[in-house]
Amino acid sequence: MTRNKLYSFLLIACLAGLIYLFYNIHTLQSQTFRVCIIKNVSGYPCPSCGTTRAVTLLLKGKFIESLVLNPIGIVVAIIMIIFPIWILIDIIFKKETFYFWYKKAEGTIRKPWLASILIVLVLLNWILNIYKHL
């Protein structure tokens, strides 16, 4: 993926996430409304079910509750804050530090031992989501 495509994709994804988070915080939704396609189809939560609620709790300063609800929420919140700022700094100063970091991180994550650990963590989170009846 080229630098411009990566930066565009991540900026749009973070903006969409922030818009959805803002919408979710400022509107009252019925208890039966679910965005998760996996949960709508199967009745079981996906590994990321509860992420929006976890980020919302984090924004309210409830770190422990956020972590208990879904640890992925903290990762998503960090990404939604740091990545756009880093990308915009790169664009302003005409640098490619984020792009080089991304390429290095991608190469590291492709190592079988690390990929296996990350997959196990996601599966454990999924099992916890099912156990918690998210």
Image (tube, rainbow, N blue to C red):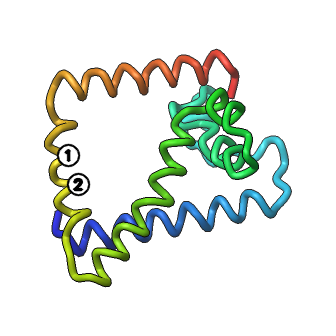
Taking the spot 43% from the left edge, 21% from the top edge, the residue there is 123
Q: Nearer the viewer, residue 36 or 14?
A: 14
Taking the spot 33% from the left edge, 73% from the top edge, the residue there is 8
Quarter the C terminus occupies: top right
Report x, y in % for residue 83.
Answer: 40, 61
Q: Residue 70 shows which numbered tag?
A: none
Taking the spot 82% from the left edge, 53% from the top edge, the residue there is 29
Number of numbered markers = 2
Q: What residue is disc 2 on? A: 102
Q: Quadrant of residue 31?
A: top right
- The answer for how far apart the CA atoms under marks 1 and 2 are is 6 Å
* Kind of residue indicated by mark 2: Tyr
What is the crowding at mark 1: few (fewer than 14 residues within 10 Å), some, or many (at least 20)? few
CB-based contact (under 8 Å), mark 1 and mark 2: yes
Q: Quadrant of residue 100?
A: bottom left
Q: Could you tell me which secondary element the residue under label 1 belongs to?
A: helix
Q: Residue 106 shows which numbered tag?
A: 1
Question: Horizontally, is 6 left or right of 22 in the view?
Answer: left
Taking the spot 37% from the left edge, 64% from the top edge, the residue there is 10
Q: Quadrant of residue 1?
A: bottom left
Task: Reply above or below: 94 against 119.
Answer: below
What is the crowding at mark 2: few (fewer than 14 residues within 10 Å), some, or many (at least 20)? some
Report x, y in % for residue 110.
Answer: 17, 36
* Kind of residue indicated by mark 1: Glu
Task: Reply above or below: 3 against 108.
Answer: below
Report x, y in % for residue 11.
Answer: 41, 70
Q: Could you tell me which secondary element the residue under label 2 belongs to?
A: helix
Report x, y in % for residue 126.
Answer: 51, 24
Task: Reply above or below: 74 against 134.
Answer: below
Question: Horizontally, is 54 left or right of 122 in the view?
Answer: right
